[in-house]
Image: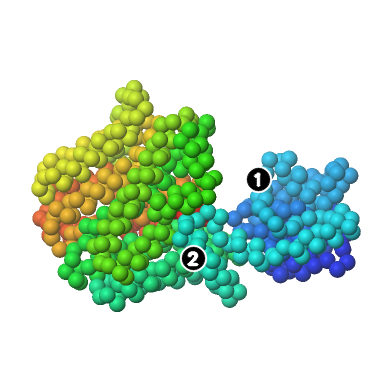
Amino acid sequence: MSTAILTGQPVPGSSIEGDLRSLGFDVRTAADAAEAETLLAEVPFEERVALVDARFVGHVHALRLGLTDPRFPLAAIPGAVTAQPAGRQALTRAMARENSAGAGTTLVDSLADRILTALDADGTDVHRPELGSLVAAVPADPQARNEARQAVADVDDEAVRLKSAVKARDGFFTTYCISPYSRYIARWCARRGLTPNQVTTASLLTALIAAACAATGTRGGFVAAGVLLIASFVLDCTDGQLARYSLQYSTLGAWLDATFDRAKEYAYYAGLALGAARGGDDVWALALGAMVLQTCRHVVDFSFNEANHDATANTSPTAALSDKLDSVGWTVWVRRMIVLPIGERWAMIAVLTAATTPRITFYALLIGCAFAATYTTAGRVLRSLTRKAQRTDRAAGALADLADSGPLAQGFAEALKKPARRLPGFTAPAVALLGGLAVVLTAALTGFGGPWTLVAALGYALTSGLAVARPLKGPLDWLVPPVFRAAEYGTVLVLAAKADVNGALPAAFGLVAAVAYHHYDTVYRIRGNAGAPPAWLVRSLGGHEGRTLLVTVLAALLTASQFTVALTALAVAVALVVLVESIRFWVSAGAPAVHDEGEPA
């Protein structure tokens, strides 16, 4: 139970007490600041508490936004301030100081607003939600109160709430083909007590059923798969809209939402590959290639954003041109569509699955994703080369964590730290790319299990160490993590394809999926300011260079059939270790509530 303390002179006919109770607050009344401080001390520390001016006039949804959002320790709107346990001490301290100073020391009449002023004076971070057309005010006289009440009557509270449930920035397909009705599904779910996590789980189950339908290899199965994939995406949009509509944010929900999208898409790729195999067409290499390309695209996004979000002097002519294009209506949608975001991508996959074959679907997916990756990466490279950004130690640390370097690379990095200082600024991405290309091309151009691939993998470990031997603060150092991802995943793909035995590529698909999950898990921990996964996990998994070397050793020592069994065992081992640690972390009290308000590529 949350507690709201009403302060100030009650207003006859005011609905504030009923509004607060409708939001789940136990309402208590304080005659003055001293009594408010006493009531505040009586509220259990583990409960949310709010101070609300009894003269408050405004929309219920304004109160909901200001007083019930679980993501912020302290939040406020005009006439009301709230604290969760994490912000309780700051609120209590501000209340004590304000009460001892006396109400006459400030021109602000509302106790809640005086407390907010005191919190600001302390430098405390207080969330103030954007209210837009919603009203939240403490009128000073009857005329102002009547005007505020008329303003409340002029704005449809529910319409604003429904509109705000939809992301402010989304893809074209999502904005015009899904959100116009999915928001009403979200409201239907809210009124029946369903949670975002339940809707997220339903989306996952729907996608898995779609993958199973695709795996049948029949035309009816492909049509059903396409329809169910769209239904899964509708539910995927609905869960976020339900969270925003009802402010049901949670750490577990953040983790589920962050990971299930990738699980759904990659499980669907596997279903398509199984369905094609039933029809005599082996497209596992295409399915794995699509997963590799899509994962590398995401790592480019994550790395670039982490490198630049807190950089200083972070401007460039290219960025200015991009911002200018975003101010022209039609170019906004064109630029959002050509990067093939999740809505457009899933719609394309669904339609092609129903109307064509898995091979054609994967060809279109690979071509579209390759073009999108080229477009976005080229633009970011241009921005990086033309800006004079000064990257922070935090950004360099995040890129090092995203690199996922194991004991070998870290050992080489320590040994090469001094000579690396004398190398040019573009050394890190250049040597990472050189080493990655060497191992992938050697594996592709030589026979399966050849010794030269093993030599190239050892060279890759050395160049990987050199790439991270000094802080990743160079203009293009954000390219290092995606280059490492492409090298590791590409090596597994090529060696499995060269094995040319049944089961090798599906085993490689499983291994890359398990490792990719580990990399996504790292991303969302960093986004939540929780740091990278524990060092023991990175060491036990060997890092990207250790896994690459291990796979090449297995190819050199084992027959193709034995290699397939070893890949399968490695995939299961990695998946178990990664999932157990990830679940342990994300259900723990210290996990961050990460909610992605942008549509991932």
Residue annotated with mark 2: 178
State the image coordinates of residue 132 (x, y, percent, origin top left).
Answer: 68, 54
Q: Nearer the viewer, residue 548 or 329?
A: 329
Where is residue 377, by image quadrant? top left
Q: Amino acid at mark 1?
A: Asp
Q: Amino acid at mark 2?
A: Ile
State the image coordinates of residue 65 (x, y, percent, origin top left).
Answer: 66, 59
Residue 110 visible: yes
Seen in the picture, residue 308 relative to 498 is either above or below; the reply is above
Identity of the residue furthest to the top in this view: 422
**CA gap, disc 1 and disc 2:** 36 Å
Q: Which element is circle 2 on?
A: helix
Question: What is the count of numbered marks?
Answer: 2
| Residue at the image point whose x is 32% and y is 65% from the top | 352
State the image coordinates of residue 326 (x, y, percent, origin top left).
Answer: 51, 45
Seen in the picture, residue 191 relative to 56 is either above or below; the reply is below
Residue 587 visible: no
Q: Nearer the viewer, residue 39 or 50?
A: 50
Q: Quadrant of the N terminus?
A: bottom right
Residue annotated with mark 1: 125
Q: Nearer the viewer, residue 564 or 170?
A: 170
Crowd band around label 2 with a 10 angstrom C-alpha radius: few (<14), some (14–19), many (20+): some
Picture disc at residue 92: none
Q: Which comes before the other along the chain, label 1 or label 2? A: 1
| Residue at the image point whose x is 49% and y is 38% from the top | 321
